[in-house]
Amino acid sequence: MPRTFLALGAINAFLCVALGAFGAHSLKQKLSIDMLAVYQTGVQYHFYHALGLMAVGLVLLHFPKSRLIVLSGWLMLAGIVLFSVSLYVLSLTGIRGLGAITPLGGVAFLSAWALLAYGSWSDK
């Protein structure tokens, strides 16, 4: 499992750099300032949680049997999809209904960090 989360983190970090560059160079003239800020928020939280996925992989090296830490990693990945990807799509398409999905990603992020802390503390 550690390798899985390390690889997922590295892949997502790569995607963040690519998406950030795309936003900075290709979307600057195409999106409103507000929508560009939404896009950049998606990239920012995506990158934080790409690093979080790598942290999960490293923590799993110390607690390889922890189900909570594994769940934390999957919740971080779900949060990336629900939060960041919904912001990317919202900013590019203007579909406001996606705003209902974004908070679910935030809850996934919060849950992931809480489980990582608890799993590291309790070794469960």
Image (cartoon, rainbow, N blue to C red):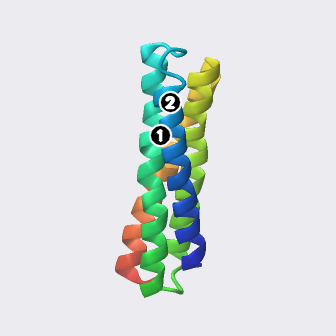
Q: Where is residue 71 in the image (x, y as percent from the top left)?
A: 56, 68
- 10 Å neighbourhood of mark 2: few (<14), some, or many (≥20)? many
Image quadrant in which the N terminus is located: bottom right
Q: Which of marks 2 and 1 is in front?
A: 2
Residue type at tag 1:
Val
Numbered disc 2: secondary structure: helix
User: Nearest the camera: 94 or 116?
Assistant: 94
| Image quadrant where residue 33 sits | top left
Q: Where is residue 114 in the image (x, y as percent from the top left)?
A: 40, 62
Q: Residue at x 42, y 86 (%)?
A: 62
Q: Name the residue under label 1.
A: 43
User: In the picture shown, does residue 79 fall above or below 120?
Assistant: above
- 10 Å neighbourhood of mark 1: few (<14), some, or many (≥20)? many
Mark carried by residue 23: 2
Mark carried by residue 74: none
Pick out the residue farthest to the front: 25
Left or right: residue 58 versus residue 5 is left
Q: Where is residue 18 in the image (x, y as percent from the top left)?
A: 54, 43
The earlier-in-sequence mark between 2 and 1 is 2
Left or right: residue 100 versus residue 110 is right
Q: Which residue is drawn at 50% across and 15% down?
A: 29
